[in-house]
Image (cartoon, rainbow, N blue to C red):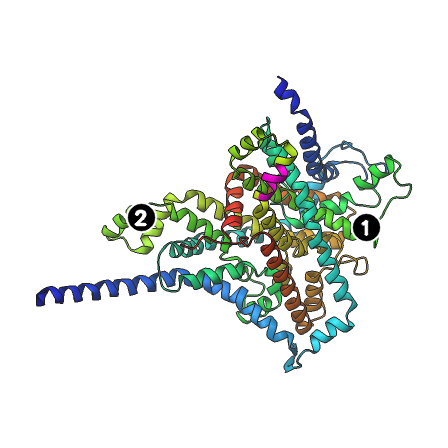
Amino acid sequence: MSVTAMDSSVARSRFTERRSTRKAVLIWSFLAPSLVIFLLYRILPLAWNVLLSFEAWSPLKPAVFIGFDNYREMFQDDDVFWQALWNTLGIIASAPLGIAIALGLALLVNSNIRGRDVYRTLIFLSYPLMTVAVAIIWRWMFDERVGLINYVARSLHLTDQPIPFLNSFTWALPCVIAANIWQMLGFYMIIILTGLQTIPGNLYEAAEIDGANSFRRFLRITLPLLRPSLFLCFVIGMLNSVTSFDLIYVMTNGGPGHATEILVTYIYKLAFNQTRFDYAAAITVVFFLLLLAVTWGANRLSGGNVGAVEYD
Amino acid sequence: MARQRRHWPIHLVLIAACFVMLVPFYWVLKTSVSGENIFSYPPSIIPRDPHLFYYVDVWYAIPFARYFLNSVVVSVLTIIANVVLNAMAGYSLTQAFAGKQIVLMLFLSCMMIPFQATIIPAYLITGKLGLLDSYLGLALPMFSTIICIFVFKASFDAVPRSLLDAARVDGLSEWLIIWKVMMPLAKAAVATNVILSFIWSWNNFMWPLIATRSQDMQTLPLGLARFISYQEDTTGALYAFCIMVLAPGILLFLLAQKEFVQGLTTGATKG
């Protein structure tokens, strides 16, 4: 190799190096605004919550480190916290019911019938709507005096007295859950439909030739292949439902008593009505760990690819 | 013919499902145009003496125009920021660079943090930035969304490499490549971004509830919730308000259903 050739190759590599550094700077500057938003409103709050949960602090008092006192109060003395925790778990447990209904509807919509797009649109319509308005709609449906549900129940003589659904300790939580399922149903259905369309049709043909009836085909082909979609529904639906602050705030505001209190509404009330930021932060930490645990569990059950992204 | 006959049970079930999905809307719509006392029993199934009085009433009962303006300003800010920031971030993720895995991991873990679990520090941070009770403060937390970044990434990944190389040979900077080459080819991704960020910011309730103090800064969902706490549910104007707030969302959804569904399923399967 001659001297000049070596020189030029060094120069070239220096040139490409400079170009690639410039490009890296450029790429990071493209990412920077989004990263700043996520650091500011996702990562930093998470760390701050943890810090705050070990302190006694309010906007007027200087912070004092108090160890696990907030957590001790929460687990030992706070009945409302336990109620809110159970209600939150109840809402999580109701997600599979919604998913099962959506699965049935998705199978029907997926069949080769006329007007399937119309059905799909109408069932999906409730999902993108403003939850506050949905809450008002359902308040009105459940209304004690002239709500449609009471009217139908009384017309069919299911009950003599109108039921004050949202003011009743027994009925309030199921009513809120029903409204939540009503809003999420279309979303579940869309995700399941997308999953159904990825199942190759020749599997069904082969099974039919082998003499499997439609129920067995559903059990042996559809359900196993849909597993990732179903668990995806569960994770997203769960995250959406337990954080449906608007629905509960407007429908019942956690009442009657604390019958429909969920962790998010309780956190809000503690922080912004009672200025107990420190204690609310401790509950937030527990709430977040609960979500992580449920998501992790669902992920394990689904075969581990919920939320997976193709790396390339 | 036999085929069509076999389908009638399916139609029956689906019609029943659609009925359940639509009846609540109808019940509120009926109340909002009905002329009778809304508490008369038994409630009428079809509106009696229909009129639009309640829709006029809304304008006197609450500062509807102000709420509407606030909602529009916050939504427009959010949409513009989302399209610009997400396109930039999405483009970066199509390139190879040191630290890409870390960024991807960071994005994925951020998706696991629901906004509701960050409200207290988010409030304190926004306060420190001096942005409480301002349009920017209302929109800032939603300026960039991870799902939408992946929507752009998926769309940019589909652009042939040779086109990029040609643009670089022509001397276009990376910045211009995004706007002159990539964006025109990613119209569907832009539409998805616009629709998703509009729906999210238009419907957002919890953050405006926390981050606004004065009534002048309140958005439509807050106005709706405030209306119900002042007036209870004693007036049909509440339901007229409800319909007025829902209408733009329904209209947009019906017009752009395809992009909306695409965004949700991309977001769901990619992240």
**Chain letter of the residue beneath label 1 in the structure image:** A
Q: Which residue is mark 1?
A: A171
Labelled disc at residue B244: none
Which is the main secondary structure of the residues drawn in magenta? Answer: helix
Instruction: Measuring from the top left, give residue B13's x and y in whole percent.
Output: 69, 31
Do we see residue B213 in this rendering? no
Query: Separation of disc 2 and disc 1 at Cα?
Result: 59 Å
Residue type, mark 1 in image: Trp
**Chain letter of the residue beneath label 2 in the structure image:** B
Residue type, mark 2 in image: Arg
Tell me, yes or no, whether the highlighted magenta stretch contains residue B220.
Answer: no
Q: Quadrant of the C terminus of chain A?
A: bottom left
Labelled disc at residue B161: 2
Res A298 → quadrant? bottom right
Magenta residues, start to end: A218-224
Crowd rating for badge 2 (residues with CA inside 10 Å; few <14, some 14–19, many 20+): few
